[in-house]
Image: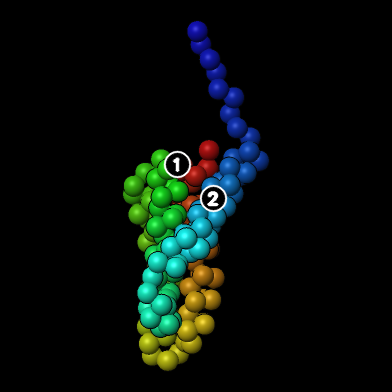
Amino acid sequence: MTTTETPRSTARKLARFAGHYAEMVAAMLIGMVALGPLWPSAWLERADAGALVMATDMTVAMVAAMALRRHSWPRIAEMAAVMYLPFVALLVPYWLGALSGTALMVAGHVIMFPLMLAAMVWRRAEYWH
């Protein structure tokens, strides 16, 4: 018996791509809520430590979600790195006094989301199907 698979339309592929992105964002939010209370409060009082803790919470949950969806480990590692990169890069200006703790957290998140999208576009084959 021969079966033919009907190719998905561009709109359907875009919807699935957007769905992948939304799932990762949802997993990150769940990670912040579920894992945040597990950390010592003294760590969270410092903006630099708090930013890394939050990045860790979001990354752990996002890695679990991507592994559950059977993404490849290189793509999972790539996305995890993209999530830490903004915070790590912004620590230097924070330590030099050029950024406040609030600016560190806000800028880290604002930069992270487009970087995640860029990683997904760069590896379209992994997410666009």
- Which residue is label 2 attached to? 23
- Furthest residue in direction right, as rendered: 11
Indicate the secondary structure of the residue bearing disc 1.
loop
Note whether 103 is above or below 71 in the view shown.
Answer: below
- Which residue is label 1 attached to? 69
Residue at 54%, 47% (x, y): give it: 20
Q: Is residue 58 left or right of residue 9?
A: left
Q: Is residue 69 left or right of residue 13?
A: left
Residue at 41%, 50% (x, y): give it: 64
Q: CA distance from mark 2 to mark 1?
A: 10 Å
Q: Position of residue 111 (x, y in %)?
A: 51, 69
Note whether 21 is above or below 128 in the view shown.
Answer: below
Task: Choose the circle earlier in sequence order: 2 or 1.
Answer: 2
The crowd level at tag 2 (other Cα within 10 Å; few <14, some 14-19, many 20+) is: some
Q: Position of residue 62 (x, y in %)?
A: 44, 54
Report whether residue 76 is seen: yes
The crowd level at tag 1 (other Cα within 10 Å; few <14, some 14-19, many 20+) is: few
Residue type, label 1: Arg
Q: Does the CB distance between marks 2 and 1 fall below 8 Å?
A: yes
Residue type, label 2: Glu
Residue at 39%, 45% (x, y): give it: 67
Residue at 43%, 63% (x, y): give it: 35
Note whether 108 is above or below 9 in the view shown.
Answer: below
